[in-house]
């Protein structure tokens, strides 16, 4: 639910993201969507019974909790590239390190990286200064152009689509026992997706929003 007094802020942020998605590809100023997701690590207590004719695999309902890992997903929709990092925690440090890797190792020639993120408190240049010295932090801040989805509008971040596909195609309802296994399986998934250059079929535009979501737009008195 979007409070009426916040509707103008919502549509402003929404149109910024949608306009960005409509821009043509520019290798010097790539658009990268970024998001995180927790993943509970669960180990089997007893070995599953393998499937046999007429009967699927059987798993014991008991399991062992082994903590949580976090998936850090970056997705460039116009090229069909994505990357997934598995980290033990989700703090400003992990975010800053992921964006440094994105900027310096994956996009070293980009002048600006337009980064679509939600409003999580670690998603700011301040995280860079908490981890790196001032010179490196400032260099990163100059190259990263943050584009925030509106509050209650994280669905506008295409990284969420990739995370949904990752969960459906790779993780499903299986139990993943540790971060190493999660890292290995996530890597196999995103490398296969990258080879296919699979991308999101995004068709929602600013013009669509003004028609289909017109009730969100504040009424302007003459």
Image (cartoon, helix red, strand yellow):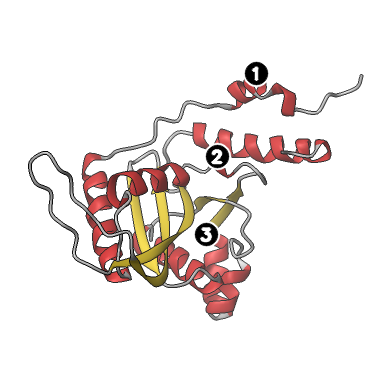
> Would residue 184 appear left or right of 34 to someone viewing this image?
left
**Dot 1 alpha-carbon crowd within 10 angstroms: few under 14, some 14 to 19, many 20 or more:** few
Secondary structure under the numbered disc 3 in the rendered image:
helix
Tell me which label, 1 or 2, sits earlier in the chain: 2
Outermost right residue: 222
Label 2: which residue?
A: 156
Count of marks overlaid on the render: 3
Tell me which label, 3 or 1, sits earlier in the chain: 3
Q: Is residue 206 visible?
A: yes
Residue visible at 34% across and 48% down in the picture: 166
In the picture, the quarter occupied by the N terminus is: top right
**Residue 180 locus on image (x, y percent):** 27, 70
- Mark sitting on residue 143: 3
Q: Is residue 27 visible?
A: no
**Residue 72 locus on image (x, y percent):** 43, 60
Q: Nearer the viewer, residue 65 or 60?
A: 60
Residue visible at 53% across and 78% down in the picture: 131
**Residue 24 locus on image (x, y percent):** 45, 33
Q: Nearer the viewer, residue 52 or 69?
A: 52
> Would residue 5 appear left or right of 222 to someone viewing this image?
left
> Would residue 60 appear left or right of 156 to someone viewing this image?
left
- Mark sitting on residue 211: 1
Quarter of the rendering containing residue 208: top right
Q: Is residue 166 above or below residue 196?
A: below
């Amino acid at each position: 639910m979007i409070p009426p007094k916040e509707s103008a802020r919502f549509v402003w942020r929404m149109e910024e993201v949608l306009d960005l998605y409509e821009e043509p590809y520019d290798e010097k100023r790539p658009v990268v969507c970024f998001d995180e997701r927790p993943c509970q690590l669960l180990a089997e207590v007893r070995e599953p019974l393998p499937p046999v004719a007429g009967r699927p695999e059987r798993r014991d309902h008991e399991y062992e909790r082994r903590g949580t890992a976090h998936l850090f997903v970056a997705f460039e929709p116009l090229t069909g590239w994505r990357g997934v990092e598995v980290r033990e925690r989700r703090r400003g440090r992990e975010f800053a390190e992921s964006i440094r890797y994105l900027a310096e190792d994956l996009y070293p020639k980009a002048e600006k990286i337009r980064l679509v993120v939600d409003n999580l408190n670690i998603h700011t240049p301040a995280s860079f200064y908490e981890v790196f010295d001032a010179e490196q932090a400032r260099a990163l801040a100059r190259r990263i152009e943050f584009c925030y989805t509106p509050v209650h509008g994280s669905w506008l971040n295409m990284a969420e689509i990739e995370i949904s596909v990752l969960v459906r195609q790779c993780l499903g309802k299986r139990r993943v026992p540790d971060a190493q296994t999660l890292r290995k399986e996530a890597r196999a998934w995103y490398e296969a997706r990258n080879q296919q250059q699979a991308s999101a079929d995004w068709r929602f535009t600013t013009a669509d929003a003004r028609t289909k979501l017109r009730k969100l737009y504040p009424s302007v008195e003459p």
